[in-house]
Amino acid sequence: MTVSRRTFLSTLSAGAAGLAVGGLGLNSAAQAASPAGDVVGKVTVGYQGWFACPGDGAPIGAWWHWSQNWSQAPSPSNNVIKAWPDSREFSRTYPTAYPNLGSGAPATLFSSYDQQTIDTHLQWMAQNGCDTAALQRFDPNGSEGPTRDAVTARLRSSAEAHGVKFYVMYDVSGWTAMQSEIKADWSAKMSAHTASPAYARQNGKPVVGIWGFGFDDANHPWDPAACADVIAWFKSQGCYVMGGVPTWWRTGTGDSRAGYLDVYHSFDMLSPWMVGRIGTAADADNFYTNATVPDLADCAAHGIDYQPCVLPGDLSARQRAHGDFMWRQFYNMARAGVSSVYISMFDEFGEGNQIAKTAENQSQLPAGSGLLALDEDGTACSSDYYLRLTADGGRLLKGRLALTAVRPTPPVVGGSGGGNPDLALHRPVAERAHTQVYAAANAVDGDPNSYWESADNAFPQWLQVDLGSAVTTRRIVLTLPPSSAWGARTQTVTVLGSTDGSSFGTVVAAAGYLFDPATGNTATIGYPSGASARYLRLLFTANTGWPAGQVSGFSVYAS
């Protein structure tokens, strides 16, 4: 079985935690070494894509990463995961030997080999501000190799379809003949994927990640010369090389071997590992002072891009504090001036650090499994909560949200998140039709300059958002791009609502709404008595400025 990063990380942080460096501080003016690209200035998520089930057609033919003994179905006595996925959106799942869920439904699991699974994951990324997926690639020369190759091809296809970037990130843990085989694998197989328009590029170069150089344990035995050789080789192939490095890379202590600083400085980007290092907001603050701030200064001094980790917390260890732990990390990164982050991880159910949709409560867990749901501390959280929180964290780092230590993301859509959040932001959307590249998702992406435009000369047209569950709302704010190139216009809009997505009733009757660049190109639709609906649909029947419905921002508020 593949070596887990957790097996050698959990005891290393204590010895290094005392490396205080005083009151160093950087502000939001801190600059990355490189301009914004597909990893700099972006939110990258680590993507395992390493789950399989017998019957899914995968060459490995096993319960890959779902159970301790892959030849036997996962069960309470053959368990390796620390959290249970919410599989309701997957078209195909596989029965396990766990008891039924608390709701009475069968306990089934997804396979990463199924294209629809990856399509769903990439859709979640696209909807929640995850710009780039770093596909983990362990030693591909054993029995896992053919399945990993197939998953890579599936991820490529899905990334191209959903507008998400991806790149190959080698995890060299336990890879005996790594120095020669990693080059052969890139040359013979993985480099071909750089031809994809979805393959991540930085500074015009394809990105490749290497995780594991310099860690002070038996699974990472290579000397500095071997590590430097691999990095130099990838650079000679025209790659931008990102390094997943020990937490204490800069000091050569704790989890890092001494004498590797030149190796670390040869990477184009550094991403120090944090899983197993922090578990509370206080821990995050300590690492902000002792690691993040001085690390960023060192990288800036050496022309290296910096991409620290942000993690939701191990659910099984009750670290999450219903999102406050993760938000504290985003806040610390923003106040340090960090512009790029690596989310650890998207689908790591084995370590409990996943942001992918997860069981909300006991009704969605196998009965008697001992696993915890997202409501483990008594706070109800929707299954997509940590995806939504990641979206808000990305907005914070990109300057689209004011710096705040107060988490703005409500655990349940429509609940309190420390303010009056936009309930439609990054939510799933639908439409009757759109023209060219002006698709519905542009209306809820948080970017004031992107927009949805319906098919021309074909009224009526509609734009719809799925809020996730029925919630009472009282205000909708519509915007057009703020540029004066957009002349004033009046659009006639009806607001419709539905609890099931098929039967709609009128929330606000048809009315004309003026969009004027002199006043921000904004129109507010208020309905103070409120309306309870999961789906809100805007029905456009006229536009004095263009024969189509047009919206750059579709925001929904509870008050």
Image (cartoon, rainbow, N blue to C red):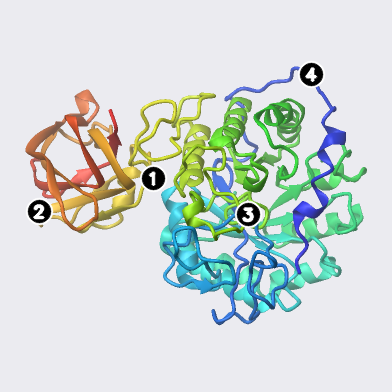
Q: Toward the viewer: 554 or 370?
A: 370
Of callouts 4 and 3, which one flags the residue occurring earlier in the amino acid sequence? 4
Residue 192 position in % (x across, y down): 60, 71
Asked if marks 4 and 1 touch (Cβ < 8 Å), the reply is: no
Q: Which residue is mark 2?
A: 460
Q: Which residue is mark 4?
A: 22
Rounded to the nearest angstrom, the CA distance separating label 4 from label 1 is: 39 Å
Of callouts 2 and 4, which one flags the residue occurring earlier in the amino acid sequence? 4
Instruction: Mark yes or no: residue 204 visible.
Output: no
Rounded to the nearest angstrom, the CA distance separating label 4 from label 3 is: 43 Å
Instruction: Mark yes or no: residue 10 visible.
Output: yes
Quarter of the image where the C terminus is located: top left
Rounded to the nearest angstrom, the CA distance separating label 2 from label 3 is: 52 Å
Give the number of callouts. Answer: 4
Q: Which residue is mark 3?
A: 370
Residue 204 position in % (x across, y down): 58, 53
Residue found farthest to the top: 23
Q: Residue at x 56, y 38 (%)?
A: 377
507, above or below 49, in the image: above
Binning the other alpha carbons within 10 Å of mark 4 as few (below 14), some (14 to 19) or many (20 upward) gives few
User: Mark 1: which amino acid?
Assistant: His
Of callouts 4 and 1, which one flags the residue occurring earlier in the amino acid sequence? 4
User: Mark 3: which amino acid?
Assistant: Gly
166, above or below 270, in the image: below
Nearer mark to the viewer, of 3 and 1: 3
Q: Residue at x 79, y 56 (%)?
A: 232
